[in-house]
């Protein structure tokens, strides 16, 4: 049980860079008494390059801005219609390792989409959540001073075209999917509370 | 048919056998520092993953990785001699490297006994490069070769 109740916040649609800087700052300044925060939001269109990104996988970004950032993983796209979840967790207090948090985020996606009759799976050799061969959700994190930031992106009801301007996660030809194509909801705001409830139940049970 | 054995996280029931394998296959001639109690502490440490192949009565191989903010450290890796040359070591390494990749950890470091060219050759094949030789690293008697694999080299390479 966490010493302090987590703060869950719906931030709405926000631009990438100020949000990234804010979670870096929170992680840098937090102490043992600071509450965990779970931010749920949508981003304006942006390509982000993770620590392991090869710029060659950024095929034709066009008019969408590109930001080089400090999370793990490769290149990805964020945009309206995608649920982004940033768990700012005191990993030591929560007794979590990186593998635990990644598995927990993946498990929450699988449980959340199962409520809409969608069967999703994670893979042993690559992070993220898949429906068949297509990727539904991506995971990339950073840990600083025992605090996690960055997190999860779940495609809900969005324009998937920008993913074709990159090799998502560094895989040539990896196809993305989203809940609206699978018979699930179209609206990020509709699924965000449910996802937050699943995640907090797992984190603080 | 060749089946790829599943890799799992070690539990407290695996601690004794992991410690014995460390004593017999890694620490021979150096005393025994990875005792069952030390392995058990590593099992319980959330910043450490112990990957195991095989069930607790018959562990074929294991690896212990400690994850920091920027650097992960491979503390131990062993595959039973009669199960070597099957790719288990490479599988264990890839499994243990995965959280480092997801979490933006920039490098994995490890030390190998300088008197074990097979181990050094194995790590080179996994993409590790020698960065230092540490005199007397093991009990002041055996030198170590420190090897490193960098993951974060993408940062700053964005072509404009």
Image (tube, coloured by chain):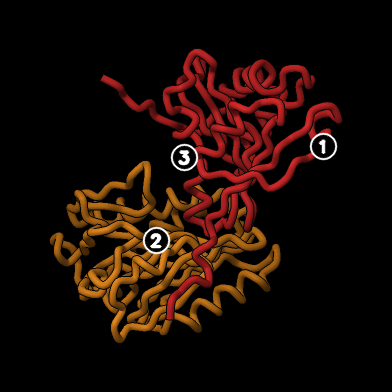
Chain colours: A orange, B red
Above or below — where is A29 with respect to B53?
below
- Report the Cα–Cα distance between label 3 and label 2: 30 Å
Relative to A191, A38 lies left or right: right
The earlier-in-sequence mark between 1 and 3 is: 3
- Report the Cα–Cα distance between label 1 and label 3: 30 Å
Observer-side mark, 3 or 2, equals 3
In front of the other: A155 or A58: A58
Task: Name the residue at 62% across, 39% down.
Answer: B74
**Chain for mark 3?**
B
**Chain for mark 1?**
B
Task: Name the residue at 34% across, 71% down.
Answer: A58
Q: State the image quarter where residue A112 is shown.
A: bottom left
Task: Name the residue at 65% across, 68% down.
Answer: A34
Q: Residue A180: where, in percent of width, then height?
A: 17, 67
Above or below — where is B106 with respect to B128?
below
Q: Which mark is residue A197?
A: 2
Q: Residue A1: where, in percent of width, then height?
A: 58, 52
Q: Residues within 10 Å of mark 1 (few under 14, many from 20)?
A: few
Q: Residue B116: where, in percent of width, then height?
A: 66, 26
Q: State the image quarter where residue A60 is shown.
A: bottom left
Above or below — where is B97 with respect to B114?
below
Disc 1 target residue: B135
**Chain for mark 2?**
A
> Helix, strand, or loop for circle 1?
strand
> Helix, strand, or loop for circle 2?
helix
Disc 3 target residue: B95
Relative to B149, A127 lies left or right: left
In front of the other: A175 or A138: A175
Are the residues tagged 1 and 2 within 8 Å (C-beta)?
no
Q: Residue A30: where, in percent of width, then height?
A: 66, 70
In front of the other: B38 or B84: B84
Observer-side mark, 1 or 2, equals 1
């Amino acid at each position: 049980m966490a010493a302090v109740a987590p703060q869950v916040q719906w931030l709405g649609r926000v631009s990438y860079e100020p949000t990234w800087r804010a979670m870096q700052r929170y992680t840098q300044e937090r102490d043992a008494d600071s509450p965990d925060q779970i931010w749920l939001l949508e981003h304006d269109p942006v390509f982000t390059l993770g620590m392991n990104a090869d710029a060659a996988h950024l095929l034709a970004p066009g008019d969408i801005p590109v930001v080089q950032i400090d999370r793990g993983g490769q290149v990805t796209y964020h945009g309206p219609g995608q649920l982004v979840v940033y768990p700012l967790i005191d990993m030591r207090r929560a007794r979590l390792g990186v593998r635990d948090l990644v598995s927990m985020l993946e498990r929450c996606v699988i449980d959340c989409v199962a409520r809409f009759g969608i069967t999703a799976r994670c893979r042993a050799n690559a992070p993220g959540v898949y429906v068949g061969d297509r990727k539904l959700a991506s995971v990339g994190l950073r840990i600083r001073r025992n605090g996690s930031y960055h997190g999860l992106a779940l495609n809900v009801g969005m324009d998937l075209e920008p993913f074709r301007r990159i090799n998502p996660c560094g895989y040539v030809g990896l196809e993305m999917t989203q809940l609206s194509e699978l018979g699930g909801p179209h609206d990020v705001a509709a699924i965000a509370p449910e996802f937050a409830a699943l995640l907090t139940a797992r984190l603080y049970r | 048919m060749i089946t790829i054995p599943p890799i799992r996280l070690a539990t407290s029931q695996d601690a004794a056998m992991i410690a014995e394998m460390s004593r017999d296959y890694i620490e021979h001639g150096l005393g025994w520092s990875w005792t069952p109690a030390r392995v058990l502490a590593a099992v319980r440490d959330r910043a450490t993953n112990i990957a195991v192949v095989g069930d607790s009565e018959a562990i074929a191989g294991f690896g212990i990785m400690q994850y920091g903010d920027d650097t992960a450290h491979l503390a131990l890796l062993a595959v039973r001699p009669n199960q070597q040359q099957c790719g288990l070591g490479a599988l264990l390494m890839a499994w243990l490297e995965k959280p480092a990749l997801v979490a933006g950890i920039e490098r994995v470091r490890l030390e190998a006994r300088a008197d074990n060219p097979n181990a050094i050759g194995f790590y080179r094949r996994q993409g590790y490069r020698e960065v230092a030789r540490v005199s007397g690293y093991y009990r002041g008697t055996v030198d170590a070769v420190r090897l490193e694999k960098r993951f974060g080299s993408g940062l700053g390479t964005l072509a404009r």
